[in-house]
Amino acid sequence: MTAQADDDDDAGAPPIPKGAKNYMTPAGAARMRAELHQLMRVERPRVVEIVSWAAGNGDRSENGDYLYGKKRLREIDRRARFLGKRLENAEVVDPARQPQRDRVFFGASVTFANERDETRTVTILGADEADMARGEVSLYAPIARALLRARVGDVVRMHTPSGPEEVEVLAIRYPDALQQEH
């Protein structure tokens, strides 16, 4: 068996460029830890129980519960390995603690306008927590790379499938730090 790269352990997982850090927010890390816990403490023991019961029923070659259970165990183990590696290599950064709020960094929500005066807002998150349907983009996505370090009013160039496009930064927001009661 050959060694696999982190991203090979979970097909469809967003790639992290070689040598880059795996940044994620505290909420993203918590979701990954919760998924890992659910897999290893709840789902895997339940599937192991089913496989053990099915194995005791005789011929395993035509036993659907046994065959499906073994397949599901491999899937759980592969996903758990992937989550474990990603969490082990994660650098958790709380965007609410960003001191330079006038520039775009990890965790910023950025509103920008393109050359056609279409405005859009994206939040720059880690590769494992970004979800385009919610307006979240990976730190390594072309738009995020173009926006990083920009300030309100800056015009930056991003590379799109249809060629370079300029966008103007209209607003930058970070989550508020939790207000502590005095």
Image (spheres, helix red, strand yellow):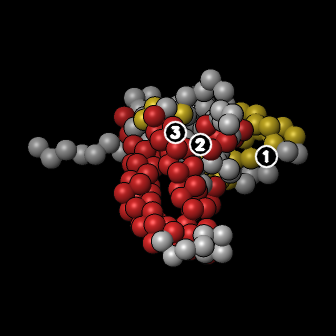
The image's mark for residue 54 is: none
Query: In the image, is 162 to the left or to the right of 44?
Result: right
| Residue that mark 3 sits on | 86
99 over 50 or under it: above or below: above
Question: For this rendering, which residue is in front, 179 or 62?
Answer: 62
Can residue 145 be seen from the camera position used here? no
- Camera-side mark, 1 or 2: 2
Query: Quarter of the image containing the N terminus?
Result: top right
| Disc on the earlier residue, 2 or 3 | 3
| Disc on the earlier residue, 3 or 1 | 3
Mark 2 burial class by Cα count in 10 Å: few <14, some 14-19, many 20+: many
x and y, in percent, of residue 75 in the image: 58, 56
**Residue farthest along the top direction in this orientation:** 19
Q: Residue at x 47, y 41 (%)?
A: 84
The image's mark for residue 115 is: 1
Is label 2 in contact with label 3 (beta carbons under 8 Å)? no
x and y, in percent, of residue 130 in the image: 58, 49
Amino acid type assigned to the residue bearing label 1 in the image: Glu
The count of marks equals 3
Amino acid type assigned to the residue bearing label 2 in the image: Ala
- Label 1: element kind: loop
Q: Residue at x 50, y 49 (%)?
A: 80
**Residue farthest along the right direction in this orientation:** 162
The image's mark for residue 127 is: 2
- Label 3: element kind: helix
57 over 180 or under it: above or below: below
Q: Residue at x 80, y 37 (%)?
A: 159
Cα–Cα gap, marks 1 and 2: 27 Å
x and y, in percent, of residue 111 in the image: 60, 47
Question: For this rendering, which residue is in front, 44 or 138?
Answer: 44
- Label 2: element kind: loop
Mark 1 burial class by Cα count in 10 Å: few <14, some 14-19, many 20+: few
